[in-house]
Image (cartoon, rainbow, N blue to C red):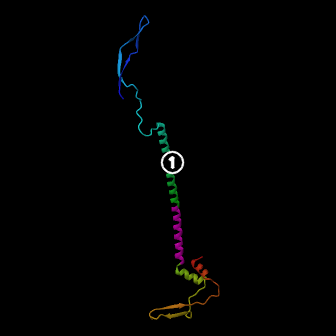
Amino acid sequence: MAARRINTYARAYSFGTDGSAVLAGGPISSTRPLERASRRAPAKAGLRMPLWAVVLSLAGVVFVLSFMLLGVRSQATEAAKRANALRGELARAREVIASLELKIDASNDPTRIHSIAVNRLGMSMPTEEQTVKLSHPPATSSFTLTTQTAQTENTGFFRLLLSLVGI
């Protein structure tokens, strides 16, 4: 903007006794532009928002982020609780497995099987008449085949298996 010299006068008047008014003082020279510039800086290119809108939007973002953080923490807590519950279930399952393995080892004991066969089922060792010896073509190996007469008591195969397991 081009500045132009403006001459203004002081606002002092002198009044005479005859009713005349005389402007007292001389002109004041100043270099002022004809139009006043606005006190604000010129608007920059882009979106300019009021301060309250910026503060309000920042508060909203902080609010949303804090609830997101609370949600993540809640999920982590739930996952930790579930992991602890699963650890407890795993420990109980391992105890059950260990007890079942002990039962299996006890049921496979040859002395226990022999006592069940003799005491519960009434079995006995085969006699010489019930034993048949077969020889294999090589004379070095032979095995014994034993047979037993059927008992008059009706005991099924399934009952035999159940009694061997101990049920």
**Which of 130 and 37 lies nearest the eye of the viewer?**
37
Q: Identify the residue position indicated by label 1 in the image.
A: 67
Residue drawn at the location 36% of the way across and 16% of the way down: 27
**Which of 119 and 24 lies nearest the eye of the viewer?**
24
Identify residue type, mark 1: Phe
Above/below status of 107 relative to 18: below
In percent of width and height, residue 158 lies at 60, 80
Above/below status of 66 relative to 137: above
Q: Tell me where the magenta segment starts and ends, as one range.
A: 86-107
Q: Quadrant of the N terminus?
A: top left
Above/below status of 28 relative to 49: above
In percent of width and height, residue 26 lies at 35, 14
Residue drawn at the location 50% of the way across and 43% of the way down: 60
**Which of 3 and 64 lies nearest the eye of the viewer?**
3
Check residue 106 for magenta coloring. Answer: yes
What is the secondary structure assignment of the residue under circle 1? helix
In percent of width and height, residue 55 lies at 47, 39
